[in-house]
Image (spheres, grey):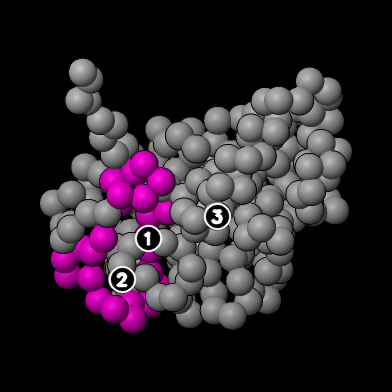
Amino acid sequence: MNDTQTLPRRGPLHARLAPHARGWREVNGYQVCAQLQGAVLGADPWLADQTHLPRLGLKGRGAADWLAAAGVTVPDAPNLWLRDATGVRVARLGAQDFLLEAEAEADGAALARLAAAWSADSGRRGQLVPRQHALASFLVGGERAADLFVRLCAVDLRPTHFAVDAVAQTQVALTTAIVLRDTDIAPRYRLYVDTSLALYLWDRLHEVTVALGGGALGAEQLPDVGVL
């Protein structure tokens, strides 16, 4: 009898967060830091790892039409994003290039069904892109969140210049990244970066976050933003 079991996956920031972690949770097959020692609730700005959220990519000829036929609402033009009726974020990076991410672990079933439908189809539908393990995802929030990007990004991401449905494919701390503004309720930004550069970018973001008077938060210390 095989008694082996699948262990939670460690994200690219595990080694950096582990010395300061106060408990772990398993989310979407990932080991997620529940709380960070020394974290200040109400910190502004704040920074959190979101790499565990379910995501996938679809790219290539026919991708937009296939998603629409599958019932997924897609943005009208590149560099825009929207939240689909299923709770999935759909970012259009190019005419036929899409990044989809579940709002929370529970919404990952919608992405799983979509991937299964794609695999069962044989028509023109683009190609699945391995976004789950190829990209790290960070969340930056707080009233001073935009000030962080003033120091690290040449693109003006202040709410007065960067629309709530906008996507920027740019450089943050000299690292190629995708940035979207998450909501207009309170300043919040989602960043996506290649996992090979995740630790470097996290360190730069954290450095500026602390300099501005904020800090990093664990999953259970986040404001109520619907990301667990």
User: Is residue 23 covered in magenta?
Assistant: no
Q: Is mark 3 on a helix, strand or loop?
A: helix
First in sequence: mark 1 or mark 2? 1
According to the image, label 2 marks what residue?
Answer: 221
Q: What element carries label 1?
A: strand
The CA span between labels 3 and 1 is: 19 Å
**Residue at 31% across / 37% down in the picture?**
9
Q: Is residue 44 above or below residue 51?
A: below
Residue 66 place in picture, x, y as percent:
81, 36
Q: Which residue is drawn at 70% across and 30% down?
A: 118
Residue range (magenta): 26-50
Amino acid carrying label 3: it is Asp
Q: Label for residue 5?
A: none
Dot 1 amino acid type? Ala
- Of the two numbered discs 2 and 3 on the same chain, state the one appearing first in sequence: 3
Q: Kindly indicate the quadrant of the structure image that contains residue 111.
A: top right
Question: SS for tag 2?
Answer: helix
How many C-alpha atoms fall within 10 Å of the one at disc 3: few (<14), some, or many (≥20)? some
**In this figure, which residue is indicated by the disc labeled 1?**
48
Give the distance between the C-alpha atoms of the residues marked 2 and 3, in whole angstroms. Answer: 21 Å
Q: Tell me which label, 3 or 1, sits earlier in the chain.
A: 1
Name the chief secondary structure element in magenta.
Answer: loop
Query: Could one spot residue 52 in this view of the protein?
Result: yes
Quadrant in the picture for residue 30? top left
Q: Residue at x 40, y 33 (%)?
A: 196
Q: Which residue lies furthest to the front in this view?
A: 1
Q: Which of 43 and 102 is in front in this view?
A: 102
- Could you give the CA–CA distance between mark 1 and mark 2, rounded to whole angstroms? 9 Å
Q: Which one is nearer the viewer's eye here, 14 or 153?
A: 14
